[in-house]
Amino acid sequence: MDNERKLSVIHYPLSTLKKTLLASLGLMRLESQKEDTKLANNRVYEVMYIAESETTDDVIADMNKVVEKIVTDEGGEIVNTEDMGIRNLAYPIRKKDNGHYILFEINGSGKEIAEIERRFRVNDFVMRYLTVRVDEERKTAQKLTDKREAKRKRVTDLMSRKGTEDTQAQENQQGGDE
């Protein structure tokens, strides 16, 4: 009887235990984890792939359309597509010295990136690919730019005030000389 009382004193709501158990098993997300998914929706990626130089423009256009379709189907957005053309490689890949470079800038959550990379791995025309998350670097660069602008503005304001004070001092000296 005493044991039953001690157990009944420690009372957790069933919903809390259930949520914790399901979260620990990976079957449910906690509230703190839900915020992480909100943040993941606004990431910016640059995806570059190198196709074999012998690949026709039609095949490259089809590959680009497939990438665009994957991104839009997963809820992302292609901000920019840049066809950089055929360039020399830094080192031979598959006994080839040049390749066709394509660069995408993608806003998305990362699901579309995983699917694009999977498709690139199995595509015989793609020699290499690289995905870089650039949103953090751009935020850092923007902060530095803002900091420089603020400093430049402070310096110009200080110089203009000093120039104003100097002209007033000169006027006072000229007025005193007369």
Image (cartoon, rainbow, N blue to C red):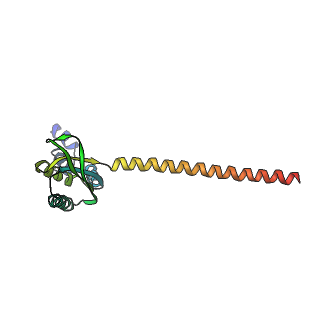
Image position of 25 with respect to 43: above or below: above
Residue at horizontal 55 percent and vertical 49 percent from the top:
152
Coordinates of residue 126 in the picture (x, y in percent): 15, 49
Coordinates of residue 19 in the picture (x, y in percent): 19, 49
- Quadrant where the image shows the C terminus: bottom right
Q: Left of 107 or right of it: where is 4? A: left
- Quadrant where the image shows the N terminus: top left
Looking at the rendered structure, the number of numbered marks drawn on it comes to 0
- Viewer-nearest residue: 46 or 86: 86
Coordinates of residue 59 in the picture (x, y in percent): 14, 58
Displayed quadrant of residue 60: bottom left
Residue at horizontal 46 percent and vertical 49 percent from the top:
145
Judge whether residue 137 can be spotted in this image: yes
Most extreme residue toward the right is 178
Most extreme residue toward the top is 3
Coordinates of residue 88 in the picture (x, y in percent): 24, 45
Residue at horizontal 38 percent and vertical 50 percent from the top:
139
Judge whether residue 30 can be spotted in this image: no
- Viewer-nearest residue: 153 or 96: 96
